[in-house]
């Protein structure tokens, strides 16, 4: 059976950047189980999985526009510390929730000094070419409940 729209696929993968540094892997853990065609994984990986069968292994390079999108410089801002009302000072690498004109946005603290905090609202993988080493473990028809309610 091939991976196709609304089928459930089970895959192991290792995701690396274009320099070969590993970002994440399912190997040694439970594999990823997802319903194909509903956008629950990045577009470039989903496209590469289309038509694959259990037992197939492959490698695919995923450009930013088919992965986590391009980086947007406008999502990096340096703000006065006085804008942060919490009692604790955020640390570099900490995730915060910012309120924007378009609604809430998760940001990461990238720098701070005595008077300012720099935050980045880009996904950490935005703008990066990704390499996925993939093994298709299984493919099956989704159950009626999965089709109605998701996995």
Image (tube, helix red, strand yellow):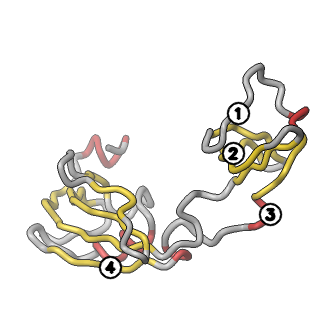
C-alpha separation, residue under disc 2 versus residue under disc 4: 31 Å
Residue picked out by circle 2: 109
Residue picked out by circle 4: 60
Q: What element carries label 1?
A: loop
For the residues labelled 1 and 3, say whether their Cβ atoms are less than 8 Å apart: no
C-alpha separation, residue under disc 4 versus residue under disc 3: 30 Å
Q: Earlier in the sequence, mark 4 or mark 3?
A: 4
C-alpha separation, residue under disc 2 versus residue under disc 1: 7 Å
Viewer-nearest of labels 1 and 4? 1
Q: What element carries label 3?
A: helix
C-alpha separation, residue under disc 1 versus residue under disc 3: 21 Å
Give the label on residue 52, or none: none
Residue picked out by circle 1: 90
C-alpha separation, residue under disc 2 versus residue under disc 3: 15 Å
For the residues labelled 2 and 1, say whether their Cβ atoms are less than 8 Å apart: yes
* Residue at the extreme top: 87
Q: Residues within 10 Å of mark 4 (few under 14, many from 20)?
A: some
Residue picked out by circle 3: 74
């Amino acid at each position: 059976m091939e991976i196709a729209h609304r089928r459930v696929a089970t895959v192991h993968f290792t995701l690396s950047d274009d320099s070969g540094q590993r970002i994440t892997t399912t190997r040694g853990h439970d594999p990823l189980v997802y319903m194909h065609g509903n956008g629950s994984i990045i577009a470039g990986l989903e496209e590469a999985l289309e038509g694959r069968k259990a037992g197939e292994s492959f490698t695919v390079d995923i450009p930013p526009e088919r992965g986590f999108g391009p980086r947007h410089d406008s999502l990096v801002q340096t703000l006065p510390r006085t804008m942060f009302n919490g009692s604790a000072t955020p640390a570099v690498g900490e995730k915060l929730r910012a309120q924007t004109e378009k609604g809430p946005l998760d940001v990461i603290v990238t720098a701070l000094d005595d008077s300012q905090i720099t935050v980045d609202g880009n996904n950490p993988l935005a703008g990066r070419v990704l390499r996925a080493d993939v093994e298709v473990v299984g493919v099956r028809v989704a159950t009626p409940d999965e089709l109605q309610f998701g996995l």
